[in-house]
Amino acid sequence: MKHAFLDKYSSIESPIHRLDPSVKIISFLWIIVISVTTPSKNFNHFGIYLSVVFTLIFLSKVPISFILSRSAVVIPFALLTSIFLITTSGFIAAWNVVIKSYIGVLCLILLSSTTPFPALLNGFRRLKVPNIFILLTSFTYRYLFVLLDEVMRIRQACDSRCFKGRWIWHAKTIGNMIGVLFVRSYERGERVYMAMASRGFEGNLKVARYQTSINSQDILFIIAIILITSLVRLY
């Protein structure tokens, strides 16, 4: 079945794609940290942060429609955190949550869209991120699409039986479907674990090596990001 992979546009040739993965991780994480620590009433600061991020999106040549459609998912969830605060402070709280969440999601989408997933894992490894985190991230990405296939098969089976699941009395059937998905996921996890254990897996994940080195372009990029965002944050 066809899936929209996170690194769908990672093979595009652009200045952002050519940057070292570890440099991109640090730079985008820095933007997120700076935006999170900025007071919510500094509206101009957030405008500049967004300008920086959208400039990077433009340089990456990733379709803006792809970025916006993916990033819009976070807005409803962010609004739910303060929707019942119908006061001036409530609106500021809503703005604070929405804008910071949105900037963070934009950075993460841009990072994953400009970096092949194996290269991203190697970037984490070079930054001395704990191996357990890299391992869990790898398995999550790898088997997420396997679970989506299971969901699609269950949905196709329901469609072939003209089951729509629109009414409250269909809740039991939908619950059974979720239970089946959980059981299948658990059984698949057991089979994967037994297969890995039988092959002597000891917790060291081997992924494709991307031989990259930090050059002057990487250094200039990370200095520019840190300098611009820090100056905006301080002044």
Image (cartoon, rainbow, N blue to C red):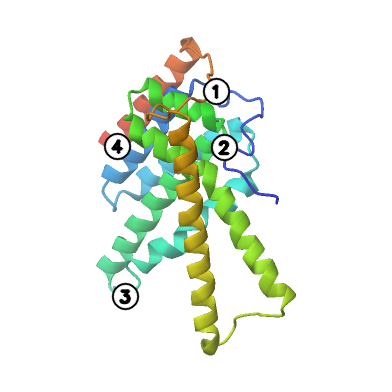
Please tell me how crowded label 2 is: few (under 14), some (14-19), or many (20+) other residues with Cα within 10 Å.
many
Give me the C-alpha separation between circle 3 and circle 4.
30 Å
Residue at (48% x, 10% y) in the render: 215
Mark 2: amino acid? Ser
Q: Name the residue under label 1.
A: 208
Q: In this view, does 118 lie to the left or right of 43?
A: right
Mark seen at residue 233: 4
Q: Which residue lies furthest to the right in this view?
A: 160
Pointer 1 or 4: first along the chain: 1
Sequence-wise, the earlier of marks 1 and 3 is 3
Viewer-side label of 3, 4:
3
Up-down relation of residue 188 to residue 129 (above or below): below
Say what secondary structure mark 4 lies in: helix
Q: Which amino acid does label 4 sit on?
A: Arg
Amino acid type assigned to the residue bearing label 1 in the image: Ala
Which is closer to the viewer, label 3 or label 2? 2
Type of residue at label 3? Phe
Mark 2 or 1: in front is 1
The mark that comes first in sequence, 2 or 1, is 2
Query: Are the residues tagged 4 and 2 within 8 Å (C-beta)?
Result: no
